[in-house]
Amino acid sequence: MRYPMNMVSKRWYSIITVLLSVAFGLFLGYFLVQGRVLFRAKGSDAVAISDLRAELAVEKSKFEQLATRQQELETRKRTLLQIDSDNPSKEALYATWREYALLSGMTDVTGSGIRLTLDDKLNYNPVTDPIESLIHDSTVTYAMNLLWAAGARAMTLNGTRMTAISNISCVGPTILSYDVRLMPPYEIEAIGPVDSMRQAVESDSWFARLRQKEIGVRIALCEEASLTLPSFSKTHDFRAYMDLLIPVEGS
Amino acid sequence: MNDKKDARNPSKLSRYVTVVAVGLIVGLVAALLMKTLNASAVSDKSYQDLQNSIIEYQRKNEELNNRNVHLYEYIRELEEDLASGKGGESFLRIVEEKEQYAIFAGLRAVRNKGVTITLTPMSGYKIQDIVIQQFVNELSALGAQAMSINDERKVATTEIRANQDSIIINGVAYSRESPFEIKAIVPPAKIDTYIVPYLETVAGNLRAQIGDDAVAITVRSEPSVTIPALEEDRIAYQKDLLMPVE
Protein backbone atom coordinates (compact mmCIF):
# COMPACT_ATOMS: atom_id res chain seq x y z
CA MET A 1 0.00 0.00 0.00
CA ARG A 2 1.47 3.36 -1.02
CA TYR A 3 0.71 6.69 0.64
CA PRO A 4 0.76 9.93 -1.28
CA MET A 5 3.87 12.03 -0.66
CA ASN A 6 2.08 14.88 1.16
CA MET A 7 0.43 12.37 3.57
CA VAL A 8 3.83 10.94 4.60
CA SER A 9 5.28 14.38 5.24
CA LYS A 10 2.18 15.33 7.32
CA ARG A 11 2.68 12.30 9.51
CA TRP A 12 6.33 13.29 10.02
CA TYR A 13 5.23 16.81 10.86
CA SER A 14 2.92 15.42 13.56
CA ILE A 15 5.65 13.23 15.06
CA ILE A 16 8.16 16.07 15.07
CA THR A 17 5.59 18.42 16.64
CA VAL A 18 4.93 15.94 19.49
CA LEU A 19 8.64 15.41 20.10
CA LEU A 20 9.37 19.12 20.07
CA SER A 21 6.49 19.74 22.48
CA VAL A 22 7.80 17.10 24.92
CA ALA A 23 11.32 18.52 24.68
CA PHE A 24 10.01 22.02 25.25
CA GLY A 25 8.02 20.73 28.24
CA LEU A 26 11.16 19.17 29.69
CA PHE A 27 13.10 22.43 29.33
CA LEU A 28 10.26 24.38 30.85
CA GLY A 29 10.05 21.94 33.76
CA TYR A 30 13.81 22.15 34.29
CA PHE A 31 13.71 25.95 34.45
CA LEU A 32 10.77 25.83 36.83
CA VAL A 33 12.65 23.45 39.13
CA GLN A 34 15.76 25.64 38.98
CA GLY A 35 13.61 28.62 39.91
CA ARG A 36 12.07 26.70 42.78
CA VAL A 37 15.50 25.57 44.05
CA LEU A 38 16.72 29.17 43.93
CA PHE A 39 13.58 30.23 45.77
CA ARG A 40 14.03 27.50 48.35
CA ALA A 41 17.69 28.50 48.78
CA LYS A 42 16.31 31.39 50.75
CA GLY A 43 14.12 28.94 52.68
CA SER A 44 14.70 27.25 56.04
CA ASP A 45 16.37 24.02 54.73
CA ALA A 46 19.07 25.87 52.87
CA VAL A 47 19.66 28.18 55.81
CA ALA A 48 19.98 25.19 58.16
CA ILE A 49 22.48 23.50 55.82
CA SER A 50 24.44 26.71 55.48
CA ASP A 51 24.52 27.07 59.30
CA LEU A 52 25.69 23.48 59.69
CA ARG A 53 28.47 24.05 57.14
CA ALA A 54 29.63 27.10 59.08
CA GLU A 55 29.51 25.16 62.36
CA LEU A 56 31.51 22.31 60.80
CA ALA A 57 34.15 24.76 59.56
CA VAL A 58 34.49 26.13 63.12
CA GLU A 59 34.85 22.63 64.60
CA LYS A 60 37.43 21.68 61.94
CA SER A 61 39.44 24.79 62.63
CA LYS A 62 39.28 24.09 66.39
CA PHE A 63 40.46 20.54 65.72
CA GLU A 64 43.44 21.77 63.66
CA GLN A 65 44.45 24.15 66.46
CA LEU A 66 44.12 21.50 69.18
CA ALA A 67 46.03 18.93 67.10
CA THR A 68 48.87 21.39 66.49
CA ARG A 69 48.95 22.24 70.20
CA GLN A 70 49.04 18.56 71.06
CA GLN A 71 52.01 17.99 68.73
CA GLU A 72 53.86 20.88 70.39
CA LEU A 73 53.15 19.53 73.88
CA GLU A 74 54.19 15.98 72.89
CA THR A 75 57.48 17.31 71.49
CA ARG A 76 58.07 19.35 74.63
CA LYS A 77 57.34 16.32 76.81
CA ARG A 78 59.75 14.12 74.82
CA THR A 79 62.48 16.77 75.03
CA LEU A 80 62.09 17.09 78.81
CA LEU A 81 62.04 13.32 79.24
CA GLN A 82 65.19 13.08 77.12
CA ILE A 83 66.95 15.60 79.39
CA ASP A 84 65.68 13.84 82.49
CA SER A 85 66.79 10.42 81.21
CA ASP A 86 70.42 11.59 81.27
CA ASN A 87 70.16 11.29 85.03
CA PRO A 88 71.95 7.94 85.76
CA SER A 89 69.52 7.05 88.55
CA LYS A 90 66.63 7.10 86.09
CA GLU A 91 68.34 5.37 83.14
CA ALA A 92 66.78 1.98 83.77
CA LEU A 93 63.34 3.47 84.32
CA TYR A 94 63.49 5.34 81.03
CA ALA A 95 64.75 2.29 79.14
CA THR A 96 61.71 0.32 80.32
CA TRP A 97 59.41 3.28 79.65
CA ARG A 98 60.68 3.43 76.04
CA GLU A 99 60.28 -0.32 75.57
CA TYR A 100 56.69 -0.31 76.84
CA ALA A 101 55.86 2.76 74.79
CA LEU A 102 57.14 0.94 71.70
CA LEU A 103 55.21 -2.26 72.44
CA SER A 104 51.98 -0.44 73.24
CA GLY A 105 52.03 1.60 70.02
CA MET A 106 52.68 4.89 71.82
CA THR A 107 55.80 5.74 69.78
CA ASP A 108 56.14 6.72 66.13
CA VAL A 109 58.01 3.91 64.41
CA THR A 110 59.82 3.54 61.14
CA GLY A 111 60.93 0.58 59.05
CA SER A 112 60.42 -1.16 55.72
CA GLY A 113 56.97 -2.52 54.98
CA ILE A 114 54.01 -2.68 52.69
CA ARG A 115 50.94 -0.59 51.89
CA LEU A 116 47.80 -2.63 51.20
CA THR A 117 44.82 -0.79 49.75
CA LEU A 118 41.34 -2.35 49.76
CA ASP A 119 38.53 -0.73 47.83
CA ASP A 120 34.94 -1.57 46.87
CA LYS A 121 34.11 -2.79 43.37
CA LEU A 122 34.03 0.09 40.92
CA ASN A 123 30.43 1.19 40.26
CA TYR A 124 29.06 -1.29 42.80
CA ASN A 125 25.44 -2.16 42.09
CA PRO A 126 23.58 -3.55 45.15
CA VAL A 127 21.06 -5.33 42.90
CA THR A 128 23.45 -7.25 40.67
CA ASP A 129 26.76 -7.41 42.58
CA PRO A 130 27.45 -9.82 45.47
CA ILE A 131 27.83 -8.45 48.99
CA GLU A 132 31.54 -9.40 48.97
CA SER A 133 32.09 -6.68 46.36
CA LEU A 134 32.06 -4.20 49.24
CA ILE A 135 34.84 -4.02 51.82
CA HIS A 136 33.48 -5.02 55.23
CA ASP A 137 35.02 -4.91 58.71
CA SER A 138 35.59 -8.65 58.39
CA THR A 139 37.61 -8.11 55.16
CA VAL A 140 39.83 -5.58 56.95
CA THR A 141 40.33 -7.72 60.07
CA TYR A 142 41.04 -10.73 57.83
CA ALA A 143 43.76 -8.74 56.00
CA MET A 144 45.25 -7.60 59.29
CA ASN A 145 45.31 -11.09 60.77
CA LEU A 146 47.02 -12.28 57.58
CA LEU A 147 49.72 -9.61 57.94
CA TRP A 148 50.24 -10.23 61.68
CA ALA A 149 50.64 -13.93 60.89
CA ALA A 150 53.21 -13.01 58.23
CA GLY A 151 55.29 -11.23 60.87
CA ALA A 152 54.07 -7.61 60.81
CA ARG A 153 55.37 -5.66 63.82
CA ALA A 154 53.28 -2.49 63.60
CA MET A 155 50.25 -1.48 61.56
CA THR A 156 47.95 1.44 60.81
CA LEU A 157 44.48 1.54 59.27
CA ASN A 158 43.84 4.81 57.44
CA GLY A 159 46.49 6.49 59.58
CA THR A 160 45.39 5.16 62.99
CA ARG A 161 47.85 2.90 64.77
CA MET A 162 46.53 -0.54 65.69
CA THR A 163 46.96 -1.57 69.31
CA ALA A 164 46.13 -4.58 71.46
CA ILE A 165 42.48 -3.51 71.13
CA SER A 166 42.02 -3.27 67.37
CA ASN A 167 38.56 -1.79 67.59
CA ILE A 168 37.02 -2.32 64.11
CA SER A 169 33.33 -2.72 63.31
CA CYS A 170 30.81 -2.00 60.54
CA VAL A 171 28.28 0.82 60.76
CA GLY A 172 26.07 0.88 57.67
CA PRO A 173 28.23 1.39 54.60
CA THR A 174 31.24 2.61 56.58
CA ILE A 175 33.77 1.04 58.95
CA LEU A 176 34.22 2.30 62.48
CA SER A 177 37.73 2.12 63.90
CA TYR A 178 38.31 3.38 67.46
CA ASP A 179 35.04 5.34 67.15
CA VAL A 180 36.13 7.08 63.92
CA ARG A 181 34.11 6.54 60.75
CA LEU A 182 36.28 5.45 57.82
CA MET A 183 35.35 5.47 54.15
CA PRO A 184 36.88 3.35 51.38
CA PRO A 185 39.56 3.00 50.16
CA TYR A 186 40.96 1.39 53.32
CA GLU A 187 44.72 1.68 53.52
CA ILE A 188 46.68 -0.67 55.75
CA GLU A 189 50.34 0.18 56.29
CA ALA A 190 52.45 -2.48 57.95
CA ILE A 191 56.08 -2.56 59.03
CA GLY A 192 57.62 -6.01 59.03
CA PRO A 193 59.25 -8.60 56.78
CA VAL A 194 58.28 -7.32 53.32
CA ASP A 195 58.67 -10.53 51.31
CA SER A 196 56.72 -12.60 53.80
CA MET A 197 53.85 -10.08 53.99
CA ARG A 198 53.68 -9.63 50.20
CA GLN A 199 53.66 -13.39 49.67
CA ALA A 200 50.93 -13.84 52.28
CA VAL A 201 48.64 -11.38 50.46
CA GLU A 202 49.44 -12.60 46.95
CA SER A 203 49.03 -16.29 47.74
CA ASP A 204 45.89 -15.99 49.86
CA SER A 205 42.94 -17.86 48.35
CA TRP A 206 40.26 -15.56 49.84
CA PHE A 207 41.94 -12.48 48.37
CA ALA A 208 42.25 -14.30 45.04
CA ARG A 209 38.49 -14.87 45.13
CA LEU A 210 37.76 -11.24 46.00
CA ARG A 211 39.88 -10.13 43.02
CA GLN A 212 37.84 -12.22 40.56
CA LYS A 213 35.92 -10.23 37.96
CA GLU A 214 32.43 -11.07 39.30
CA ILE A 215 33.36 -9.79 42.79
CA GLY A 216 35.75 -7.09 41.61
CA VAL A 217 37.21 -5.88 44.92
CA ARG A 218 40.20 -3.64 44.18
CA ILE A 219 43.31 -4.76 46.05
CA ALA A 220 46.60 -2.94 45.58
CA LEU A 221 49.86 -3.80 47.27
CA CYS A 222 53.07 -1.80 47.19
CA GLU A 223 56.36 -2.24 48.99
CA GLU A 224 57.88 0.67 50.86
CA ALA A 225 61.57 0.88 51.74
CA SER A 226 60.75 3.23 54.59
CA LEU A 227 57.39 3.68 56.27
CA THR A 228 56.73 5.86 59.29
CA LEU A 229 53.71 4.88 61.37
CA PRO A 230 52.32 7.38 63.87
CA SER A 231 51.90 6.74 67.56
CA PHE A 232 48.36 5.89 68.76
CA SER A 233 48.57 8.98 70.96
CA LYS A 234 48.53 11.17 67.85
CA THR A 235 44.92 10.24 67.16
CA HIS A 236 43.48 8.94 70.44
CA ASP A 237 43.79 9.02 74.20
CA PHE A 238 44.89 5.50 75.13
CA ARG A 239 43.57 5.83 78.70
CA ALA A 240 39.99 5.76 77.39
CA TYR A 241 40.63 2.21 76.14
CA MET A 242 41.93 0.77 79.41
CA ASP A 243 39.69 2.29 82.07
CA LEU A 244 38.06 -1.09 82.83
CA LEU A 245 41.34 -2.89 83.46
CA ILE A 246 42.37 -3.54 87.07
CA PRO A 247 46.01 -4.66 87.23
CA VAL A 248 46.61 -7.92 89.06
CA GLU A 249 49.24 -7.34 91.72
CA GLY A 250 52.56 -9.05 91.12
CA SER A 251 51.99 -9.70 87.41
CA MET B 1 -15.21 22.80 -2.01
CA ASN B 2 -13.82 25.84 -0.16
CA ASP B 3 -16.54 25.58 2.51
CA LYS B 4 -15.52 21.99 3.13
CA LYS B 5 -11.85 22.96 3.53
CA ASP B 6 -12.71 25.77 5.97
CA ALA B 7 -14.84 23.46 8.02
CA ARG B 8 -11.95 20.99 8.32
CA ASN B 9 -9.27 23.55 9.34
CA PRO B 10 -10.58 24.38 12.86
CA SER B 11 -10.61 20.70 13.87
CA LYS B 12 -7.11 20.25 12.44
CA LEU B 13 -5.88 23.25 14.41
CA SER B 14 -7.44 22.08 17.65
CA ARG B 15 -5.93 18.63 17.10
CA TYR B 16 -2.46 20.18 16.73
CA VAL B 17 -3.02 22.36 19.79
CA THR B 18 -4.10 19.31 21.80
CA VAL B 19 -1.05 17.32 20.68
CA VAL B 20 1.30 20.19 21.55
CA ALA B 21 -0.38 20.72 24.94
CA VAL B 22 -0.24 17.02 25.84
CA GLY B 23 3.45 16.88 24.82
CA LEU B 24 4.21 19.94 26.93
CA ILE B 25 2.42 18.54 29.97
CA VAL B 26 4.17 15.16 29.65
CA GLY B 27 7.59 16.84 29.42
CA LEU B 28 6.82 19.21 32.28
CA VAL B 29 5.59 16.50 34.63
CA ALA B 30 8.56 14.25 33.83
CA ALA B 31 11.06 17.05 34.50
CA LEU B 32 9.35 18.09 37.74
CA LEU B 33 9.18 14.55 39.09
CA MET B 34 12.82 13.76 38.35
CA LYS B 35 14.20 16.97 39.78
CA THR B 36 12.01 16.96 42.89
CA LEU B 37 13.16 13.45 43.81
CA ASN B 38 16.84 14.28 43.30
CA ALA B 39 16.73 17.60 45.12
CA SER B 40 15.02 16.23 48.26
CA ALA B 41 17.26 13.13 48.42
CA VAL B 42 20.46 15.15 48.13
CA SER B 43 19.26 17.74 50.65
CA ASP B 44 18.34 15.13 53.33
CA LYS B 45 21.61 13.24 52.83
CA SER B 46 23.85 16.29 53.05
CA TYR B 47 21.96 17.52 56.15
CA GLN B 48 22.45 14.19 57.92
CA ASP B 49 26.10 13.91 56.84
CA LEU B 50 26.85 17.40 58.08
CA GLN B 51 25.24 16.71 61.46
CA ASN B 52 27.23 13.47 61.82
CA SER B 53 30.49 15.21 60.88
CA ILE B 54 29.90 17.98 63.43
CA ILE B 55 29.18 15.46 66.22
CA GLU B 56 32.31 13.53 65.27
CA TYR B 57 34.50 16.65 65.32
CA GLN B 58 33.01 17.83 68.64
CA ARG B 59 33.83 14.48 70.19
CA LYS B 60 37.38 14.56 68.79
CA ASN B 61 37.88 18.11 70.03
CA GLU B 62 36.72 17.25 73.53
CA GLU B 63 39.09 14.28 73.62
CA LEU B 64 42.01 16.33 72.26
CA ASN B 65 41.33 19.08 74.76
CA ASN B 66 41.42 16.61 77.67
CA ARG B 67 44.67 15.13 76.38
CA ASN B 68 46.23 18.57 76.07
CA VAL B 69 45.23 19.47 79.64
CA HIS B 70 46.79 16.22 80.85
CA LEU B 71 49.96 16.81 78.80
CA TYR B 72 50.25 20.39 80.01
CA GLU B 73 50.07 19.25 83.63
CA TYR B 74 52.67 16.54 82.95
CA ILE B 75 55.07 19.05 81.35
CA ARG B 76 54.63 21.52 84.19
CA GLU B 77 55.63 18.88 86.75
CA LEU B 78 58.59 17.77 84.64
CA GLU B 79 59.81 21.35 84.28
CA GLU B 80 59.46 22.02 88.02
CA ASP B 81 61.37 18.85 88.93
CA LEU B 82 64.11 19.53 86.40
CA ALA B 83 64.49 23.10 87.65
CA SER B 84 64.68 22.02 91.30
CA GLY B 85 66.95 19.06 90.54
CA LYS B 86 64.61 16.69 92.39
CA GLY B 87 62.60 13.83 90.97
CA GLY B 88 59.37 14.01 92.94
CA GLU B 89 56.14 14.33 91.01
CA SER B 90 57.58 13.75 87.54
CA PHE B 91 59.34 10.57 88.66
CA LEU B 92 56.05 9.17 89.95
CA ARG B 93 54.32 10.21 86.77
CA ILE B 94 56.86 8.43 84.58
CA VAL B 95 56.53 5.28 86.68
CA GLU B 96 52.74 5.55 86.40
CA GLU B 97 52.87 6.14 82.64
CA LYS B 98 55.26 3.23 82.17
CA GLU B 99 52.79 0.99 83.99
CA GLN B 100 49.89 2.30 81.94
CA TYR B 101 51.79 1.53 78.73
CA ALA B 102 52.52 -1.96 80.05
CA ILE B 103 48.81 -2.55 80.78
CA PHE B 104 47.76 -1.13 77.41
CA ALA B 105 50.33 -3.30 75.60
CA GLY B 106 49.05 -6.43 77.38
CA LEU B 107 52.18 -6.92 79.49
CA ARG B 108 50.28 -7.00 82.80
CA ALA B 109 47.60 -9.40 83.98
CA VAL B 110 44.30 -7.63 84.48
CA ARG B 111 40.91 -8.46 85.94
CA ASN B 112 37.32 -7.19 86.00
CA LYS B 113 33.81 -8.26 85.03
CA GLY B 114 33.64 -9.95 81.67
CA VAL B 115 32.56 -12.87 79.54
CA THR B 116 33.88 -16.32 78.73
CA ILE B 117 33.14 -18.11 75.47
CA THR B 118 33.92 -21.81 75.29
CA LEU B 119 34.14 -23.61 71.95
CA THR B 120 34.10 -27.39 72.36
CA PRO B 121 34.50 -29.44 69.17
CA MET B 122 32.37 -32.59 68.92
CA SER B 123 34.17 -35.84 68.22
CA GLY B 124 36.14 -35.67 64.98
CA TYR B 125 35.44 -32.00 64.28
CA LYS B 126 38.34 -29.57 63.96
CA ILE B 127 37.66 -26.00 65.00
CA GLN B 128 38.29 -23.47 62.23
CA ASP B 129 40.44 -20.41 62.91
CA ILE B 130 37.75 -18.20 61.39
CA VAL B 131 35.32 -19.16 64.19
CA ILE B 132 37.76 -17.95 66.84
CA GLN B 133 38.59 -14.85 64.78
CA GLN B 134 34.91 -14.00 64.48
CA PHE B 135 34.36 -14.07 68.25
CA VAL B 136 37.55 -12.05 68.81
CA ASN B 137 36.41 -9.45 66.26
CA GLU B 138 32.91 -9.29 67.74
CA LEU B 139 34.33 -8.82 71.25
CA SER B 140 36.63 -6.03 69.99
CA ALA B 141 33.67 -4.31 68.36
CA LEU B 142 31.71 -4.69 71.62
CA GLY B 143 34.38 -2.69 73.44
CA ALA B 144 36.55 -5.44 74.97
CA GLN B 145 39.62 -3.90 76.60
CA ALA B 146 41.54 -7.11 77.23
CA MET B 147 41.19 -10.57 75.76
CA SER B 148 42.81 -13.98 75.90
CA ILE B 149 42.41 -17.18 73.93
CA ASN B 150 43.44 -20.28 75.89
CA ASP B 151 45.22 -17.89 78.27
CA GLU B 152 47.26 -16.39 75.44
CA ARG B 153 46.89 -12.62 75.81
CA LYS B 154 45.66 -10.96 72.64
CA VAL B 155 48.01 -8.08 71.83
CA ALA B 156 48.45 -5.91 68.73
CA THR B 157 50.59 -8.47 66.90
CA THR B 158 48.61 -11.58 67.86
CA GLU B 159 47.79 -13.86 64.93
CA ILE B 160 45.11 -16.54 64.96
CA ARG B 161 45.64 -18.96 62.12
CA ALA B 162 45.07 -22.62 61.39
CA ASN B 163 48.01 -24.78 60.46
CA GLN B 164 46.96 -28.36 59.66
CA ASP B 165 45.79 -29.85 63.00
CA SER B 166 46.63 -26.79 65.09
CA ILE B 167 45.60 -23.22 65.57
CA ILE B 168 48.56 -20.92 66.13
CA ILE B 169 48.09 -18.10 68.64
CA ASN B 170 51.09 -15.92 69.55
CA GLY B 171 53.24 -18.58 67.92
CA VAL B 172 51.92 -21.38 70.18
CA ALA B 173 50.09 -24.32 68.59
CA TYR B 174 46.78 -25.52 70.08
CA SER B 175 45.04 -28.66 68.87
CA ARG B 176 41.96 -27.95 66.75
CA GLU B 177 40.21 -30.92 68.39
CA SER B 178 40.52 -29.45 71.90
CA PRO B 179 38.25 -26.83 73.47
CA PHE B 180 39.12 -23.16 73.08
CA GLU B 181 38.30 -20.64 75.79
CA ILE B 182 38.06 -16.95 74.96
CA LYS B 183 37.98 -14.56 77.92
CA ALA B 184 37.32 -10.84 77.67
CA ILE B 185 36.87 -7.80 79.90
CA VAL B 186 33.97 -5.82 78.46
CA PRO B 187 31.84 -2.85 79.60
CA PRO B 188 30.06 -4.24 82.72
CA ALA B 189 26.83 -2.26 82.25
CA LYS B 190 26.15 -3.97 78.93
CA ILE B 191 27.14 -7.55 79.77
CA ASP B 192 23.76 -9.04 80.67
CA THR B 193 21.55 -6.66 78.74
CA TYR B 194 23.35 -6.66 75.40
CA ILE B 195 26.72 -8.42 75.14
CA VAL B 196 25.77 -11.96 76.23
CA PRO B 197 22.50 -12.05 74.20
CA TYR B 198 24.34 -10.67 71.16
CA LEU B 199 27.15 -13.23 71.44
CA GLU B 200 24.55 -15.99 71.78
CA THR B 201 23.00 -14.81 68.53
CA VAL B 202 26.43 -14.90 66.87
CA ALA B 203 26.90 -18.42 68.27
CA GLY B 204 23.50 -19.45 66.89
CA ASN B 205 24.36 -18.11 63.44
CA LEU B 206 27.69 -19.92 63.48
CA ARG B 207 26.03 -23.19 64.52
CA ALA B 208 23.59 -22.79 61.65
CA GLN B 209 26.50 -22.34 59.23
CA ILE B 210 28.82 -25.10 60.40
CA GLY B 211 26.25 -27.53 61.76
CA ASP B 212 24.72 -28.07 65.21
CA ASP B 213 26.73 -31.24 65.81
CA ALA B 214 30.12 -29.70 64.94
CA VAL B 215 30.91 -27.51 67.92
CA ALA B 216 29.27 -26.64 71.24
CA ILE B 217 29.41 -22.93 72.04
CA THR B 218 28.69 -21.52 75.49
CA VAL B 219 28.69 -17.84 76.44
CA ARG B 220 28.89 -16.96 80.14
CA SER B 221 28.85 -13.72 82.04
CA GLU B 222 31.63 -13.68 84.67
CA PRO B 223 31.64 -11.49 87.82
CA SER B 224 35.43 -11.56 87.72
CA VAL B 225 37.62 -12.67 84.86
CA THR B 226 41.43 -12.56 84.91
CA ILE B 227 43.28 -12.04 81.65
CA PRO B 228 46.94 -13.10 81.91
CA ALA B 229 49.84 -10.98 80.68
CA LEU B 230 51.64 -11.73 77.43
CA GLU B 231 54.62 -13.92 78.15
CA GLU B 232 57.93 -12.40 77.15
CA ASP B 233 59.09 -15.42 75.17
CA ARG B 234 56.14 -15.15 72.78
CA ILE B 235 56.57 -14.26 69.12
CA ALA B 236 54.07 -11.42 69.58
CA TYR B 237 56.62 -9.68 71.82
CA GLN B 238 58.99 -9.12 68.87
CA LYS B 239 59.96 -5.56 68.10
CA ASP B 240 63.19 -6.15 66.19
CA LEU B 241 62.09 -4.55 62.90
CA LEU B 242 60.78 -1.37 64.53
CA MET B 243 62.87 1.76 64.90
CA PRO B 244 61.41 4.37 67.27
CA VAL B 245 61.29 7.81 65.68
CA GLU B 246 63.07 10.24 68.01
Image: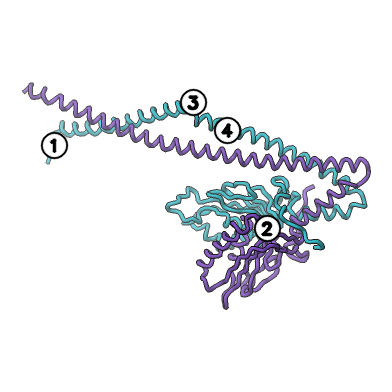
Chain colours: A cyan, B purple
- Identify the secondary structure beneath mark 3: loop
Of the two numbered discs 3 and 1 in the rendering, the one whose residue sits closer to the viewer = 3
Dot 3 and dot 1 within a common chain: yes
| For marks 3 and 1 on the same chain, the one whose residue lies earlier in the sequence | 1
Distance, label 3 to label 1, CA atoms, is: 58 Å
* Residue located beneath label 1 in the image: A3
| CB-based contact (under 8 Å), mark 4 and mark 3 | no
- Per the model, the C-alpha gap separating discs 4 and 2 is 43 Å
Q: Are marks 3 and 2 on the same chain?
A: yes
Mark 3 in CB contact with mark 2 (< 8 angstroms): no
Mark sitting earlier along the chain (2/1): 1
Inspect the image, locate mark 2, and give the three-letter code of the amino acid beneath it: Val
Alpha carbons under labels 4 and 3: distance apart: 16 Å
Q: Single out the mark in the foreground, 3 or 2.
A: 3
Identify the chain of the residue marked 3, using the numbered disc in the image: A
Q: Is residue B76 left or right of residue B201?
A: right
- Residue at the spot of label 4: A53
Mark 1 neighbour density, 10 Å: few (under 14) some (14–19) many (20 or more): few
In this picture, residue B66 sits left or right of residue A213: right
Whether residue A151 is visible here, answered yes or no, is no
Q: Which mark is residue A80?
A: none
Kind of residue sitting beneath label 3: Lys
Horizontal placement of B31 versus A91: left or right? left
Which residue corresponds to mark 2?
Answer: A194
Quarter that holds the N terminus of chain B: top left
The residue identified by callout 3 is A42
Mark 3 or mark 4, which is nearer the start of the sequence?
3
